[in-house]
Image (spheres, rainbow, N blue to C red):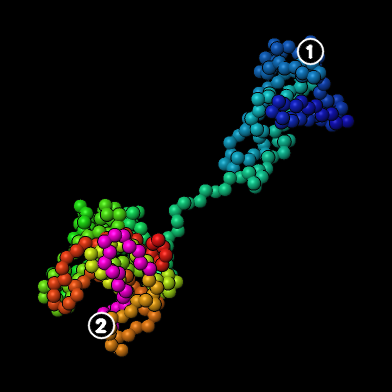
Amino acid sequence: MKKIFGLLATSSILMLAACSDDESNSVSPNSASSVTAETCAARNMVLNTDPVSGVAYCATPALTQSSSSDGLNGSTLPTSSQPELTLSSSSAPVATVSSSSIAPVVASSSSVAPTPTSTTPPAEESDGKWHLALWDGTAGDAQVPTGNKSGGYWYSYTDSGDKGKSTLTWDAADDGTSADGLVPVITECQGLCGSFNLLVGDNPYKPYIGIGFNYSKSANEVADATASKGVCVTYTSDIAIILEMGLGAQDSKIGYANPFVTLPPATSPTTKDFTWSEFEQPSWASAAQTVTNPEQALASLKFKFAGEKDSTDGGSGKFKIMKVGAPNQCN
């Protein structure tokens, strides 16, 4: 008959002492008088007493949990404050709990911590469409979210290419030509703020300066902006601002008769929303220069400050661009 001796540990882990099926090899606990601290010490064990039966026995330290790369090992036991049970007998060998006889611990899928994932957002890939999101100058970022990871960076331009003498001066300690580009200007102004002086020089057209951003890194790469539905702007300006659609390589083909809307002068922060259908080409554009649905092939948005007459100085003033985004995002 198979005999099983078990003792309940205080940690609630049941450790079983397995005995042989052979009756002659069964192990009987000694009486308290036959097991002493000295006999246990001779075995490098300690004397212990069953609190229920009063039977004395020698005990060895508990098996400890071995380290494993996956934390699960069927041949080891969890660390316990209770000693491993050893039943001492003068006439029979000592039977110990075999660690290999204990079923391995299987972790529940609900208790296993998930593998940490990166908090870095995936690289934004261009899909050929504008996904214009809010740019707020208070954040100090020089890149407008356009849906293209290399696009949206602010830049400035003047009429020097047309032999004009107009100037743009940033109202910040940094002049915008550092390695950080316009970041110091935006950080200090909480937007893009500057002053202009519209000097015609030898320019046969109206003097001008401007700031803008491209959909992508290239000024000629166009994208479908239909989904954005339009644009919003929060700004101040001493003169009207011409908000112009840049159409990339098509600009020269239409004689620079680019579709635009006008932001009226504003001495206090003002927000305007425009749909793409509100952008119109100048009245002087010929039939051959007409474009339809320009928002479907949009390369950039430009804020132009210009004089009122050709070959005539246009005066000076100040401006500040605070927010740009899709309609209703600036409010």
Q: Nearer the viewer, residue 166 or 81?
A: 166
- Residue 303 % position (x, y): 28, 68
Rendered-image quadrant of the N terminus: top right
Quarter assignment of residue 130: bottom left
Q: Nearer the viewer, residue 149 or 244?
A: 244
Q: Check residue 255 in the rendering and tell me which mark sits there, or answer none.
A: 2
Magenta span of residues: 248-273
Q: Residue at x 76, y 22 (%)?
A: 87
Q: Is residue 263 magenta?
A: yes
Q: Nearer the viewer, mark 2 or mark 1?
A: 2
| Residue type beneath disc 2 | Gly
Which residue in the structure is indicated by mark 1? Answer: 32
**Callout 2: few (<14), some (14-19), or many (20+) C-alpha neighbours within 10 Å?**
few
Q: Is residue 47 above or below residue 290?
A: above
Q: Is residue 41 magenta?
A: no
Q: Residue at x 77, y 18 (%)?
A: 51
- Residue 28 % position (x, y): 82, 21
Decide if residue 271 is in sight here: yes
Q: Nearer the viewer, residue 43 or 205?
A: 205
In the image: residue 190, left or right of residue 205: right
Quarter assignment of residue 252: bottom left
